[in-house]
Amino acid sequence: MGQYDLETIRHSTAHLMVQAIQRLYPNEKIELGIGPAIENGFYYDILMDKKILDEELKNIEDEMKKIIKEKLPITRRVFANREEAAAFFKERGQNLKVELINDLPAGEEISCYEQGEFIDLCRGPHVEHTGQLPTFFKLTTTAGAYWRGDSSRPMLQRIYAISFDSKEALKAHLTFLEEAKKRDHRKLGKDLDLFFFSSEAPASPFFLPKGAFVYNELMDFMRRVIRYHGYLEVVTPQMLDVSLWKTSGHYDNYHEDMFFSESENRQFALKPMNCPTHMLVFQNKRVSYRELPMRIADFGRIHRNERSGTITGLTRVRTFCQDDGHIFLSMDQVQNEIQELMKIVAMTYRHLGFEDFSLALSTRPEKKLGDDATWDQAENALKDALEKSGVKYTIAEGDGAFYGPKIDITVRDAIGRRHQLATIQLDFQLPERFDLTYMSKEGKEERPIVIHRAILGSLERFFGVYLENIAGAFPFWIAPEQAVIIPVNTEKFADYCDSLYAKFKQKGYRVRIDDRNESLGKKTRESQMAKIPFMLVIGEKEVEAGTVSVRKYGEMQSQTMSLDELCAAFDKLNEERNPIEMRYFWIVRKIFYCFQGEAQPNMKSPLSLQATSKNALTKKPFPSSLLSLRKMANGIWKKIKKKFF
């Protein structure tokens, strides 16, 4: 096997799979689409009347192994020209292949590969005979795929497979797939009673009370982050006149993915993104250079006409909320702002459990607004910001938005999968198209630059990725249920459980009593299955001592705690509602003004703390008895400032 790379083995195995299908279904007319090697395996698209079921995949695997034992020679044939190749495949009823041939550039070499009775259009390379193919493959699933990604074309059957060059690699990947299956957000959403989908609203999730709580907590978390970093939140309309989308360029570049409506002879569109509405917000008043950077945030709903073949649970939906933001600024402010944005992204992801993330600079696509000189300026500005930040990044040629280049941030989850979430986009086009200006220091009208940014991105998509990353076990601060009180005897210990419940509710914890007439074993099993952070078991011993038996999710051992100890632990865990950087800021602020005995000012950022604390600690007299505390506070602030700011 070592003489062939894994991609060649996978591509040859894709041919092997289709040959096995043709043998197993000899009476079916089977048209071949495409069958590329992909990460961890391959797929092949075929057109046939019979639908291949997942339970039939094992039969296809067995037939593939028989063909391997036959050691069929694999030979290459080159056609004299495009006409000869098209005629060859047309005679065999392979119309999809004829279409591919006709779309090839004139003069390109066209070849096919034969193994026994099987023939396929292919540029190769392949192994020399089927006996050289390893048996370390598994057909995993079937799916639908439009021919050439066009929803107006026939729906083909796509058969996915994994393929490796060793038994150990195959076994490791199967283990990974089993873990991924357990973590599938669609399964967890159902099991944990978080959300569901209905045919009445295709690709539009319904969040149930528990799911809605997490959804809103994520939104509130981002609100705290952006307010901390100087953003002003706006609310903008859902539906706007089509003329706006023509001005922005979305109508020409994006209209196939938009929903339209009509009223009183005017055509409207549901917004697929917030950008144009924020241009109107900026345009609404005369802006001074003193107000820049102007940071605007929006949590409005977005609607996009995603094709049914591309929809996948929460990760690709037709209606969603985006933690959207636009920053209006001057050219000399771009570098610092982008570097700060990357710090915000890093802080947010680390707090939510994503430690490993990578960056890619996506450059101009073929379909774009503006001239190359403007694009050069925008791309160089992003590149310079990345270089000055000292972060590693890759170049994604042609993956930019139609109005500007962007930095895409991809996270790796707990089982190694990568998900593109955050994006930072630099835009010179929309300010020009909307004729936006601000008054400069010299009293002249200047054109602002716009940074489009989303940190979590689509809240729905992030919810799905986050749910899979934590395998449904929410951290205490965001869990819809933080603890469940389980009495050993429902009637006997009811009063004590009620008193605990009242105390917890008073302190704002999300707790319930499981007072069903069920066994203790069943209640504890169901609590574990629901992934509730804490079980609080109450028996005779706990009632007599005024304590609680506490068992943390995922742990086998319980510990006895007093009510005060438990509340202190819960309070500590609830502090994780904010990233540690933000918690340090407020702690130091309290230290300064506690020592001064003054009311705490309404400060918005670490910068205002720095200015105010300097005044408080240097210009006003400090009581001599607090001199050592003053020095300690100064020392803490210097360390925090160096680490985080």
Image: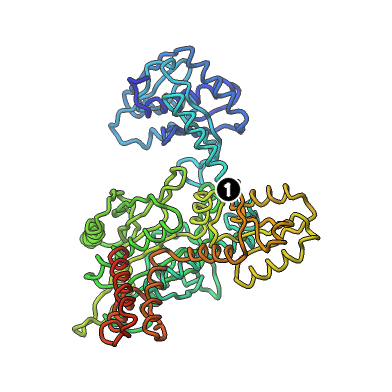
Looking at the rendered structure, the kind of residue marked 1 is: Gly
Instruction: Point out the residue furthest to the top here.
Output: 70
Is 92 located above or below residue 560 in the figure? Answer: above
Does residue 616 appear anywhere in the picture? yes
* Residue toward you, 358 or 447: 358
* Residue toward you, 433 or 55: 55
Does residue 278 appear anywhere in the picture? no
Instruction: Point out the residue furthest to the left here.
Output: 442
* Residue toward you, 558 or 642: 558
For the C terminus, the image quarter is: bottom left
Q: In which quarter of the image is residue 427?
A: bottom left
> How many numbered tags mark residues here?
1
Residue 40, image x and y in percent? 43, 34
Q: Mark 1 points at which residue?
A: 554
For the N terminus, the image quarter is: top left
Q: Quadrant of residue 561?
A: bottom right
Q: Is residue 204 left or right of residue 117?
A: right
Residue depicted at 41% across the width and 25% down the height: 165
Is 228 located above or below residue 599 in the figure? Answer: above
Q: Quadrant of residue 489?
A: bottom right
